[in-house]
Every structure is written in C-alpha cells, then in structure tokens.
Image (tube, rainbow, N blue to C red):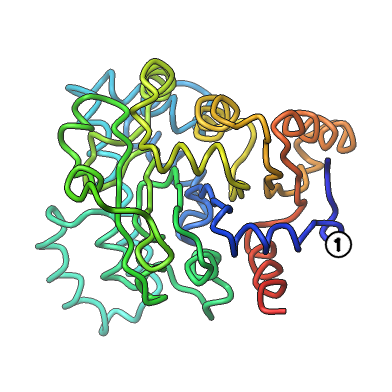
Amino acid sequence: MTQSRDRIDWKTIIRRIKAGKCTPIISYRVSARQFSDNEAAVRAWADEVGYPLADRHNLARLAQYASCIRPDALSAKEEYLDFLKQRLLHRFRAEQPPDQTDYFLATLQAELVDLSFSELASRLGYPEYASDLDNPLRILAELPIPVYLTTNFVSFMEVALKAAGKEPRVEVCGWREDVEAGAPSVFKEDPEYKPSVEEPLVYHIHGLDAYPYSLVLTEDDYLDFLFNVGQDPDVIPNRVAVALADSSLLLLGYHLQDWDFRVIFRGLITSRRSSRRLMSLSIQLTPDPQGVENLVDAQEYLKRYFEGANFEIYWGDVQSFMKELWEQWES
C-alpha cells in the first residue's frame, strides 16, 4: 500500500527497531554527497574509456565494455576506482584555497596508490554535512540496529557507526569463489560473533573497494551474482539471511530500473522473505514528470511492483525520511 508521509505507521517501525527487527538496505546514493553527480561521473568515465554507445549513464554496461577492452574485468574495476579517486581529489582541490591544499595534496598524491577510495574520502573529510541530522547514515548509526546491509562499495556506514561510539564488524558477500577466498570473513575469524547494537554487522552485498575483485560492477557480475546466490544459499551468512527474511526492511536510495536494486530485490529480498512478510518500506522520490508521460500511472506501477512483497512506499527523499524517522524516534 502506498503511503503519504503522514500515514506511515511510525509506531510499528519504531517498535521493530527497538526489537532489533528492522534492517536497512543502503544504496550508494545515501552515502555521500560526492555521489550526487554520479551520472555525470559515469559519463566522464565513458569519455575516458571511449565508450561508443548512446547509454553513457549506464554504469553496469559501461563497466562491461571496459572489462572487454582492458586485459580483464579486474583491470576495469581498478581503473574505475582510480578514476573516482582522481575525481574526488579534483573536487577537493576546487573547493579549497590553493595555499591551504598544495602541500597536503602533494603528500597525499604520493600515497594515493595505496589508499582505497574510502580511505581517501576519509582523509579529505568526506562525506561532509552541516550537522549529524543532515547525514542519513549518522542517524542510522544512532539507532539500535544490529545488521546494516549495503550495496555500496565504500565504508561510510562504518565511519558513521564509529562516530556513534560503536564497533562495527565488516563482511563482504562471497558471491564468487575468489571473493570468498580473498576477502576476510568476520564469521570465520570469530565464529562466536553475533551482531549486536554495540558491535553491529555491516554487510557489503556488492563488494568493498578495499578488495576491487569483490565489486559487482559489470552486467556479467550482476548475472553471476544472481546465479551464484540462487544456486548456493550458504553464500549469504545465516545472520544476514535471517535479517532479510524476518525483519522489516528499509530500502534507502534505490531506483527501480537500476541493476543494484533489481538484483537484490529479486535475488535476496523476494526469494527469502518468510510467509509472514513483515511490513517494509521503500523510500522513493516522486517520479520526475519530465521523464514519464503519466505521473499517476508511474506511481501506480511502483505501488504494484512493491506490494507483493509487502512493501509500502514513502514518497520523498532519503534525507527527509531519516529526519522524520529520527523525530518519531525521539518523541
């Protein structure tokens, strides 16, 4: 059922959060304002790799092309991460007075090859918000949530949790054998670990930038992810599977047509929901009237798409939703 803001069942959401039965699933769009121009960044990378087709905003297709013209798929992923680091440095340089940044950036440039994108962003002070309440991740971090799921490959959720005085543990989805073998697993290193409010789990569904081979980036990656997770349910740790099946989910920052959303919704959410199907929320911007012929029909389509999995729709942006959720939590 589609809900207006004033008709959301906040009491149920708050009750589920208090009971540890609410699990956010976080897109890259939530994590940092430097990604607000993501489409422009993708188009810029398309120019850099010489992408010849018209759909220059489609990152999965662009990455697929790059993986074909580079030595291998890993090279394309490494190149994309390097491109993002250079773009972030360029932005930082443009925003700061030269006399305050030249020496710092020269020093940083020497270390750049050894820094992940997440580490570089942290060194540069990103993501930057006017206050904690303007940062959706900071609000999420303050709530008593034991498991955070994200398709983002950066570690901003972990940073927000540490700022909230918590000790997050990190797990990368072993969607492929080399990922499972190469990325450290908190559950293998500490079999007694159970996610808690004080030591929450941050589960990176589509990889983490510290391990470029773990990224789900190309079209083939998304298809392989969907197939491998479907073939072997044990790819998903039991505690994550329980959170997906037996808690209210908050889908934050996803667009219906994007690969990251389609793969997790079909491969992880609808395929693993229990028969009880606890009420969940998808935070959706009102469809852009410039991009649709009939706004009412577009909203009805979104409603019907989600209702089979017992998802209600909150029409608005993630930042507004999280502020409103915090107000409800505080009251």
Q: On the picture, is 320 further left or further right than 267?
A: right
What amino acid does circle 1 point to? Asp
Q: Quadrant of residue 94?
A: bottom left
Q: Position of residue 62 (x, y in %)?
A: 41, 28
- Left or right of 55? Residue 158 is left
Which residue shows up at 30% across the image and 62% down it? 89
Residue at left offset 76%, top offset 42%: 287
Left or right: 12 as drawn, with respect to 154: right
Residue assigned mark 1: 6
Q: Residue furthest left?
A: 110
Q: How many marks?
A: 1
Taking depth in this image into account, of 246 and 297 the one nearest to the observer is: 246
Above-or-below relation of 140 to 331 = above
Picture coordinates of residue 96 (x, y %)? 36, 77
**Image x and y of residue 88, in percent:** 34, 59
User: Which residue sits furthest front?
Assistant: 192
